[in-house]
Image (cartoon, grey):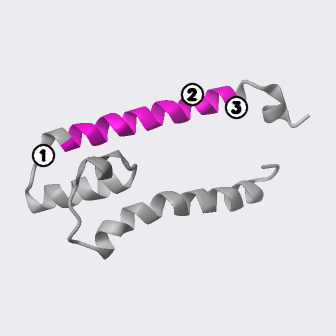
């Protein structure tokens, strides 16, 4: 993005992609945390919060969610490092 206004426009769409999975458990409260759900970022956090409020504890699925979130963060940091390693991306030459 060349301007902050353009960056905000681009990030708005990305933000929607990450917010929608957080609202799925609110729309359908009967959902339970399973292995596949523990691998989906943002969705797993919403389901873990629902389980903690309900008083159900499944440490294995909480661990799967934690490890998958850490892996996704490491991948995002690595991709960002690779992208900004190129000077053309930074200086737009």
Q: Which residue is mark 1?
A: 58
**Left or right of 15 on screen, residue 43:** left
Distance, label 2 to label 1, CA atoms, is 31 Å
Horizontal and vertical percent position of residue 34: 23, 52
Circles 3 and 2, Cβ within 8 Å, touching? The answer is: no
Q: Quadrant of residue 25?
A: bottom left
Circles 2 and 1, Cβ within 8 Å, touching? The answer is: no
Circles 3 and 1, Cβ within 8 Å, touching? The answer is: no
Near mark 1 (Cα within 10 A), the count class, few <14, some 14-19 or many ≥20, is few
Residue 76 part of the magenta-drawn span:
yes
SS at badge 2: helix
**Left or right of 15 on screen, residue 5:** right
SS at badge 3: helix
Q: Which mark is residue 83?
A: 3
In the current view of this chain or complex, which residue is farthest to the right? 93
Horizontal and vertical percent position of residue 38: 29, 48
Distance, label 3 to label 1, CA atoms, is 38 Å
Q: Which mark is residue 78?
A: 2
Q: Quadrant of residue 50?
A: bottom left
Horizontal and vertical percent position of residue 73: 46, 36
Near mark 2 (Cα within 10 A), the count class, few <14, some 14-19 or many ≥20, is few
Q: Which residues are magenta?
A: 61-83
């Amino acid at each position: 993005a060349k301007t902050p206004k353009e960056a905000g426009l681009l990030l708005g769409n990305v933000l929607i992609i990450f917010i929608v999975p957080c609202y799925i458990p609110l729309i359908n409260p009967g959902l339970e945390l399973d292995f596949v759900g523990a691998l989906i970022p943002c969705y797993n956090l919403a389901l873990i919060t629902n389980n903690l409020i309900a008083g159900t504890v499944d440490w294995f699925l909480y661990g799967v969610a934690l490890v998958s979130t850490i892996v996704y963060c490491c991948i995002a940091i690595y991709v960002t490092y690779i992208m900004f390693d190129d000077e053309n991306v930074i200086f737009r030459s």
